[in-house]
Structure formats: C-alpha cells, structure tokens
Image (spheres, rainbow, N blue to C red):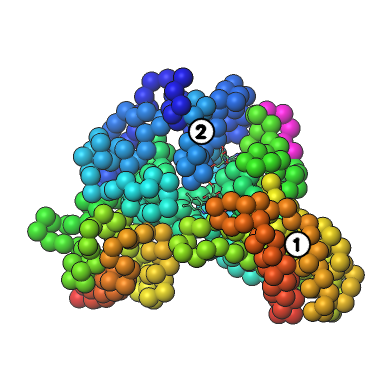
C-alpha cells in the first residue's frame, strides 16, 4: 500500500439505504465525500472507497411549523444567502457562513461536511449549537436524532457509527424574544484563516431578564463546547454589564486551549472573555429589536 | 474497480473520459485536455489559482475530483474569448490596467471575476474585493485587478444596452 490518497472506488448512491449499505460494506476503508474541501486537503491515504452524497437529495433549506430543516449537503453559500436564515436568531448561522473560508470554498463546502469533519474551530457547528439544533443520522437500522454537540467526540472524530451518515439538521423555531450572535477572531490577512477563537451566543429575554442562554466556544478545546458555567451565571437574572462581564470570565475558565500555528494558548484564553462579552452584548441588543 | 466514465462539457465542448477516482478536475483539465491556463498553486484551497467556473459558480479545481463534475458545464480561462482575435472585456480590462505581472494568479483571478459579474452585473467595489478575497496575488497587489473588474462590468453593461 502506498502512502498516497489513491481510492480505487467511487460511488454516487441514489438513496440513503444504498449509501448505508456501501458504508457498511467498506467499513473503515470508506469515506463520505461532499464538497471535498476538508477531505481533499487532508487526503487520508487509508481511504479506498469514496461515497459521494451528491445524489441523495440533501440540498435544501425548508421552514415549517416544526422548525427549519437543512439538508446535510446544502452548501455554505446557500446558507449565507438564505432568506429563511436572514432574520431573527437564525442569522447567527448565515453570519457564520458569511465569514467562513473564501467565496469559492463556500460554493463547494457543505454544512454536513463542516459538522462531520469535527474540527474544534468549525464555524457552522457553533452557530447550530446555540440554536439548540439536532441532527438526523441515518444508517442501516432506524435513523436517530441527537443534539448537534453529541456528534463531536474528539478532534476530527465523530460519534457516528461506521454505516451512518448525517442527513438533516433541525433548528427549532424560536417564538420568544431572542437574539443571537457569532464572532470570529482570525488574522484577517486573508479570508482563508480559520478561527483563533470563535464564539456563538443566543439569549432569550423577557424584559431585561435572561430566561435562557447558550454560549458555545470554538478552537479552545478538542471539540466545540458549551460554556455551561458562563450560561448558569445568566439564567433568571437581570442582565447588566457587570453580570455579562462575570459570565464572560467564567467562560474563559472553562476553555482549555492549546498552542498552535495560529495562536498561543495564553492569547486564546485572554480572548475568550472579550469575545463572549461582545457576543452577549450583541444578543442583548438584538433581543431589543426582534420580536417573535 | 475500473476507471470511471465521465461526461463533461468544457468551454462548450463535450468530452467523454475514463478517469481514476482520485484525479482532480485540475489534473484532468491540464494533463488530459491540455488546458494549461488553469494553474496549480497551493493545492489546498488557499490561493485560488486553480479557480474555474462550474455551472456559472467559481470553484477550486484542485479540491474537486473530476468524478464529481459528471454532467456539469465547466468554463476555464481558455473559454472566455468568443473569437481568437477578440479578448473578453475582463481580459481587456486586466491588460489595460496592468493588473498582471507574473500572471500566475491571473486565470484564477479572472474566472473568479467572471463569476462575480455573472451573478451581479453592477457590483460595488466592496463586492468585488469580497468576491476576489480567495484569490491571492503575490506581485501585482490587488488594486489594479479591482479597478479592472469594475471597468469590465461597465463595458459589459454598456454592450448589453447597445
Ligand atoms: C481554504 C479553506 C478555508 C477554510 N476555512 C474554513 C473556515 O473559515 N471555517 C470552517 O469552519 N472551515 C473552514 N474550512 C474547512 C471546510 O471548508 C469546512 O469544514 C467545510 O464545511 C467542509 O465541508 P465539505 O462538504 O467540503 O466536506 P468534505 O471535505 O466533503 O467532508 C468533510 C468530512 O465530513 C464527512 N462528511 C461529509 N458529509 C457527511 C455526511 N453527510 N455525513 C457524515 N459525514 C460526512 C467526510 O467523510 C469528511 O470526513 C476551510 C477549508 C479550506 C480549504
């Protein structure tokens, strides 16, 4: 066996059961391919069989009484410009899509690939986490539904079984006064830089009280994580500058960043409270301007 | 598994090929079809030198497998000119503004520009800068290209009104 990326098989199944069958037949030697913008950069040499999701009809964004449903093969540019995601707290997802990678990469990259690549810095994953999204996963048996954050196991590793693929993301409808925000810190030298730290937050308020809150942190742990202590600080309390500052500092305490080419662990840890504070302030502002 | 049959249209011409699953669109364009205008830069999606258009959208041919483009319409820099002796308004404007020095990034830059103008015939300067943000140039800078794209947009709009 050579150490090059030399898959000898390529399949483009026409339905989910065919896809699950192929995944199960080829086991560890198989890899799903969507936009290929992660897979063809890493080019894993052990892959012998590529299974393309292009013909599975997973390219859609729909909204009904039940919520917003996004097919796993929907591209990032479609999410960025989606009318459905252009207002309310859902903008957190289109905003994350808008600052991800370059225009050409966005035309290729899919939301399913962003999630299933399981990068700790994945932009869309964070936005989905604060919207309490769930993922529908299908394999040879019954399909199952799990919270987005339960897909992540470790760096570039998901909890999906060998025969499973991500099919759809479901975002529940938000009916109360809610604001959400996404902030990405990067070098800005070129638009390809992935995050040094990224933060998403979602705040549901009644008058000036916090009813519910979600804060998700990226690039500071082995997977995207919720800042649970920081969230606890806010729930049920009256929102003011001091409380937001305390919550932001709690989030820093929950982050466990590492040094890498993009930044040092120390710098990342210093940036967490600043970004969380800004994201929460954004949420508060947006709570005020958006009703139902 | 044997090679995989591929039917694609490149610059309006139909091709039927048998390709390996791992061959990129860039490999096929350059090595099989002899269309060497499209360049290999970083090979990892960061520089934009390999940009071509598929069904009117800019994509990176180094990160696209040829097998993924079955049934699609591909346009490369070689397909811009209607006649050999007549440059496309984008090419014209790039020459006029000296938006080309070494020229290595130019085919990708022009194809990204083409996609911008195909979707928005009257882009703002900001829209052009954002649209070209995935195309790196290490010698010319970026100002001249932006001016060239804005001028090409005016030329194309004028031609359409006439
Ligand atoms: C230049 C460049 C810049 C980038 N910048 C950013 C950035 O700023 N932010 C960011 O978050 N990412 C960035 N990325 C990473 C990448 O573009 C995204 O993660 C993208 O969303 C991946 O989607 P894809 O469809 O291309 O995935 P692919 O490469 O096709 O697949 C990625 C992984 O997911 C698996 N997979 C795909 N679809 C499914 C499915 N339906 N079910 C189960 N598994 C599946 C594949 O098997 C593979 O392991 C960048 C990449 C490049 C090349």
Image marks 1 and 2: residues in contact by CB distance under 8 Å: no
> Main SS of the magenta segment?
loop
Question: Under tag 1, what secondary structure?
Answer: helix
The image quadrant that residue A178 belongs to is bottom right
Decide if residue A245 is on the left or right side of residue A263: right
Q: How many marks?
A: 2
Structural distance between the alpha carbons of marks 1 and 2: 34 Å
Residue B38 percent coordinates (x, y): 27, 48
Q: In the rendered image, which quarter contains the C terminus of chain B? A: bottom left
Q: Is residue B67 visible?
A: yes
Residue B58 percent coordinates (x, y): 38, 55
The image quadrant that residue A155 belongs to is top right
Q: Residue at x 69, y 46 (%)?
A: A222
Query: Callout 2: residue from which chain?
Result: A
Q: Is residue A92 visible?
A: no
Nearer to me, B79 or A175: B79
Q: What span is colored magenta in the figure?
A: A139-144
Residue A113 percent coordinates (x, y): 57, 45
Decide if residue B129 is on the left or right side of residue A158: left
Magenta stretch: includes residue A249: no
Q: In the rendered image, which quarter contains the N terminus of chain B? A: top left
Q: What residue is pinned by disc 2? A: A44
Q: What residue is pinned by disc 1? A: A252
**Badge 2 density bin: few <14, some 14–19, many ≥20, Cα 10 Å:** some
Q: Residue at x 67, y 59 (%)?
A: A266
Query: Callout 1: residue from which chain?
Result: A
Residue B5 percent coordinates (x, y): 35, 29
């Amino acid at each position: 066996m050579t150490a090059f990326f030399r898959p000898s098989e390529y399949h483009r199944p026409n339905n989910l059961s065919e896809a699950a069958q192929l995944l199960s037949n080829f086991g560890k030697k198989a890899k799903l391919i969507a936009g290929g913008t992660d897979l063809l950069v890493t080019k894993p040499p052990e892959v012998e069989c590529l299974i393309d999701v292009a013909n599975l009809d997973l390219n859609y964004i729909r909204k009904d009484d039940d919520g917003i449903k996004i097919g796993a093969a929907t591209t990032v540019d479609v999410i960025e410009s989606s009318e459905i995601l252009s207002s309310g707290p859902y903008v957190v997802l289109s905003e994350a899509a808008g600052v991800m990678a370059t225009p050409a990469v966005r035309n290729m990259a899919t939301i399913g690939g962003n999630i299933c690549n399981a990068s700790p810095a994945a932009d869309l994953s964070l936005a989905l986490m604060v919207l309490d999204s769930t993922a529908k996963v299908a394999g040879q048996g019954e399909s199952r539904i799990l919270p987005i954050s339960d897909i992540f196991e470790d760096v570039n590793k998901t909890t999906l079984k060998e025969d499973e693929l991500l099919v759809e993301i479901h975002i529940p409808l938000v009916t109360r006064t809610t604001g959400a925000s996404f902030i990405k810190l990067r070098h800005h030298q070129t638009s390809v830089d992935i995050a040094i730290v990224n933060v998403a937050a979602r705040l549901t308020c009644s008058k000036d009280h916090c009813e519910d809150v979600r804060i998700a942190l990226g690039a500071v742990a082995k997977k995207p994580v919720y800042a649970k202590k920081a969230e606890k600080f806010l729930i049920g309390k009256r929102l003011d500058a001091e409380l937001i500052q305390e919550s932001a500092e709690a989030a820093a305490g929950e982050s466990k960043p590492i040094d890498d080419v993009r930044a040092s662990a120390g710098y990342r840890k210093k940036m967490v409270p600043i970004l969380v504070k800004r994201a929460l302030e954004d949420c508060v502002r947006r709570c005020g301007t958006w009703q139902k | 598994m044997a090679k995989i049959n591929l039917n694609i249209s490149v610059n309006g011409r139909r091709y039927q090929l048998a390709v390996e699953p791992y061959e990129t669109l860039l490999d096929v364009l350059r090595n099989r079809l002899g269309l060497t205008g499209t360049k290999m830069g970083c090979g990892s999606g960061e520089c934009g030198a390999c940009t071509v258009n598929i069904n009117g959208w800019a994509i990176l041919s180094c990160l696209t497998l040829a097998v993924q483009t079955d049934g699609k319409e591909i346009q490369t820099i070689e397909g811009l000119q209607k006649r050999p002796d007549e440059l496309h308004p984008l090419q014209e404007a790039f020459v006029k503004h000296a938006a080309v020095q070494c020229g290595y990034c130019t085919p990708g830059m022009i194809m990204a520009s083409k996609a911008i103008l195909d979707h928005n015939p009257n882009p703002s300067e900001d829209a052009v800068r954002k649209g070209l943000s995935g195309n790196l140039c290490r010698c010319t800078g970026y100002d001249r290209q932006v001016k060239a794209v804005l001028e090409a947009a005016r030329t194309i709009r004028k031609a359409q009104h006439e």
